[in-house]
Image (tube, rainbow, N blue to C red):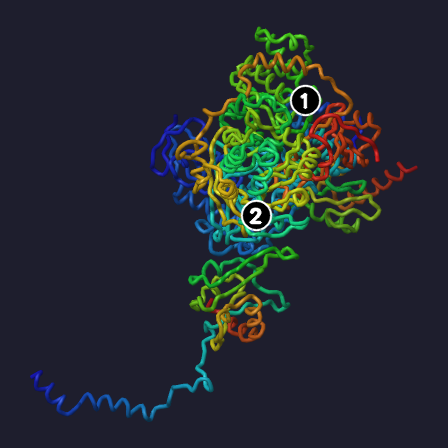
Amino acid sequence: MLDIEIDGKALQVVEGSTIIDAAHQLGTYIPHFCYHKKLSIAANCRMCLVQVEKAPKPMPACATPVTNGMKVQTHSEQAVKAQKGVMEFLLINHPLDCPICDQGGECLLQDLAVGYGASASRYQEEKRVVMNKNLGPLVATDMTRCINCTRCVRFTQEIAGLMELGQAYRGEHAEIMSFIGQTVDSELSGNIIDLCPVGALTSKPFRFSARTWELARRKSVSPHDGLGSPLIVQTKHDKVMRVLPLENEEINECWLSDKDRFSYEALNSPERLTRPMLKHGGQWIEVEWQQALDYVAHAFKDIAKNHGAAALGALLSPHATLEELHLGQKLMRGLGSGNVDFRLRQSDFSQDGQGTPWLGMKIAEIGSLDRVLVVGSFLRKDHPLIAQRLRQAVKRGAQVSLVHSADDDQLLKAHAKAIVLPSQLPQLLAQVVKCAAELKGVSVDAAITALAVSEKAKAIAESLLSGTRAAIFLGNFAQQHEQAATLQALAQLLAKITGANFGFLGEAANSVGGYVANALPGADGLNAGQMLAEPRHGYLILNAEVELDSARPLQALAALKQAATVVLLSPFKLPGALDYADVLLPVSPFSETSGSFINTEGRVQSFNAVVRPLGETRPAWKVLRVLGNLLNLPGFDQDSSEQVRAEVLGAATPTPEFVTDRLANPLSDVANNVANNVAIKLDAGPNGLERVADVAIYSADVLVRRAPSLQKTRDAASPAARMNAVTLQQCGVSAGQELRVRQGEGQAQLFAVLDAGLPDGAVRIAAAHPKVAGLAAMHGAITVEAL
Amino acid sequence: MLSDDAFKKIDREIAKYPADQKQSAVMAALAIAQDENGYLAQETIAAVADYLGMAPMAAFEVASFYNMYDLAPLGRYKLTVCTNLPCALSGGVDAAEYLKQKLGIAFNETTPDGLFTLKQGECLGACGDAPVLLMNNKRMCSFMTTEAIDQLLTELRADLRGQAT
Amino acid sequence: MGALTAFFKSLFLKELFQGLAVTGRHLFVRKITVQFPEEKTPQSNRFRGLHALRRYPNGEERCIACKLCEAVCPAMAITIESAEREDATRRTTRYDIDLIKCIYCGFCEEACPVDAIVMTRIFEYHGEKPGDLYYTKQMLLAVGDKNEVQIAKDRAQDAPYR
């Protein structure tokens, strides 16, 4: 510890602290622009100059390490004079356009100019003008306003992982730009808007639409990925105007992925459903709530009476709130049907009833891991901020290994990578298990010991065993895999051998909540896959576009089309549902309802509505509750979502509360399951071409699919058939050619794209897009022919 | 984009640094690329960056920072006249003016025949020899009086003719 | 002594005659009452009457939707909505002043960085039904267009004191 005196106040700071750290510890504000607690120190704005005793010149507080006995004056005459001088220089080239600047009112330069700026400029010469850059559909630029603090550059370099922005040229000509003609395509790009201390980088969707002082700030929780980032939703006149991160060091730190930040545009989409609708003689008519609900109650009662309650099924969404999922399953069970599921993209359900998949640790602990194995995950796109945490861990010396079917650049230096066909994933993982078992001297199943071990598997096993805090995570791709249970068994066995933490990277905001709410098939019930494979007479769908969100889109569509009654609760007029549904009930998106999400680390985050429901939209939990009343089911008399939550989680729960005691990653009986699963499936060799399906980041759920700005990004490009050179040659096609892709009974027309990161024999086609809804399944054999 | 020969030269530069710090060779690599192509096109910079395992923007930062890297095509002979203070006091400005008049171009322009490009340069470290100019980043020409300039231009034109025949 | 003075004062009605003297004097002084509406009082160039939105000489509206007038308005009489126009400039899509709420303090004019919202000399206006005094952007621009000469003259006159 070092002793330091700031403005006459003595304190102790840890060695290696800078003056600005010490000042923050004391609560003293030192003006600054380029300094940011999460970024490296650049010390190029010079705004934080302070007077240090015995130093001949003012020193930058952000870059000056504290020495023992240092005496610092932050607001002495010399310091203030230096700061005012710096401010005068900064304002020389800064345009006087605050009235048309979106940053006006929340601008660091504006604020500090009030304290340190002169009332008039002494600068008579011509001001500098910098051409604006096109950074893509999310970030607007006014580069003349830039003060070259390089926060955005350091962000893309250090946090987002790829230096997409840089400071080109020099001196007065220095400007921040992307590599000529390129846009910023990072999935975290929106953060540079928050970081920019001036109005040089602003939000394009929000551009010129409101002022910061007219917006109400309300807390909410992101409904997208498993992280559940806390949000500040800013509203005006009951309309969501923009979304900012709510800082929480344990979840999102101070960042937000673009998906969470810009998906709000969908909330104001013209596709919103505002009144209940009934299909009457093939025509959609708007009706009153009462009529629509009566219709639903009658239809369900009829089906239950004529075909048995098992003829009903509920397909819920992992993006729905805990309360909605609870009431949804309660409604189905009340009617006597156990057919409830929310895991629409899962295809292997053999682990059901054995636990609740979750991260297995705190999100905040990811940063302190030193050995990580991620199995089957499009990490950056599926979990942008968890990927960011891993990236920081790698910088601190952690080794991250990847086992996957596509070698996407995760923008972190992977220690070892094994990229194999989806069908080979279990075998590869088994090789790692074998290797680890040998190194540890543990005996494993004969089916595993019989395998030949590849170099990569060996490297991964060695890496896992060499650390002190290791973790193995299964990504979305592994959870959606046809042999998800085998992968789980092997990963868990590996975790047991290596002493690593075992966990799942939750796919959606409430993937854990669905389990906690028991929105799962009972012993006699059918799971999502079965419900669609064995068509039901009546379906209740909550907030899902089943023909896109399901593991087998074709089968799903057929099942829904044949059903007598399909009731859809959705905030949107889903185009597919207009065809197969019979009743459309407008329910609130996350911004218009209270509810809770349980994120992948088991943290319960409850939130309130931030705006009033649009039109006749009602919160889904209320709709389900009233449906329960109309069906005369017991236990549907809750008055608030808090009561519903209490029903699931127990009496009044403080937030945040962890439900980790209720979670347990599946497969307690590892050895048996491995024996059963592995022996049967490990020898499955490649058989023709195999599909690798990712769920593209901006088509993952109903909300993001309708966010126009996100849909203009490169990540939202229409799906293509991606293959490596060998596979292209094998199919006799070339990149850029239009192909007919057949899978099962379905087909799609796609362009061939060369992707060197795929194993031989893999055809990567993104799922969850209308263009590929004609393909049978997210995995399995596929054929390709030139058109 | 770049010849194998150029990449071999770049490899030699890379070898001077630790294996995990390939990007240390970026300046040398860009210089090699420029020698080969005459200037640094966007694709060339991207190729160099890719070869060194760094972001293209990081290489562009370097290429745009130093004024001896040229980001646009030039004439056959680039004449960089030093206009810093010591040179300016000893006739550097006059030399530049004379060149402008003689070639009929301003700074950063190329003669219509594509032969000469005139540039304003920073200190070349030979203030005692002022006025100085640099030809194609490689050849230093000292004491550039009007006669010396005339002689240089004649020589370069003759040299070109010699090459043509 | 005091009582005696008071007695004589009241006996000879001194205060009454003092008052009548004022009246009498004013009988012969020039009258200052104006016969409104035939006659009008002179106005200051800083008169704060009906609002107007101004344009530049080339016809472009001045307002850039900075919303400072909306923020400064103590009566919350101004409602603005803004958006990016096709030419990428910041413009209002709605600029309403509720004249019933307005207290004519002139803060909006003072806050305006581009002299877009101004207060004119017009004070004779009325509304006959609810909503008539809710001025929209088009109405305010029309007021400005009609009175631009006077508005410009007044601003020019006041310029040295700003």
Q: What element carries label 1?
A: loop
Between residues A158 and A113, which one lies in front from this camera angle?
A: A158
The x and y percentages for residue A491 are: 59, 18
Residue B16, numbered circle: 1
Whether pointer 1 and pointer 2 mark residues with C-beta atoms closer than 8 Å, the reply is no
The x and y percentages for residue A474 are: 59, 24
Looking at the image, is C63 positioned above or below residue A383? below
Between residues A73 and A734, which one lies in front from this camera angle?
A: A734
Residue drawn at (40%, 36%) of the image: A23
Between residues B31 and A113, which one lies in front from this camera angle?
A: A113
Residue drawn at (52%, 71%) of the image: C156
Which quadrant would the N terminus of chain A be assigned to in this image? top left
Residue B124 relative to residue C17: left or right: right
Q: How crowded is mark 2: few (under 14 residues within 10 Å), some or many (20 or more)?
A: many
Between residues C84 and A95, which one lies in front from this camera angle?
A: C84
Residue A550, numbered circle: none
Residue A732 visible (yes or no): yes
| Residue on which the image places disc 2 | A292
Residue A383 relative to residue A183: left or right: left
Residue A483 relative to residue C109: left or right: right
- Same chain under badges 1 and 2? The reply is no
Find the residue positioned furthest to the front: A306
Q: What residue type is labelled 1?
A: Lys
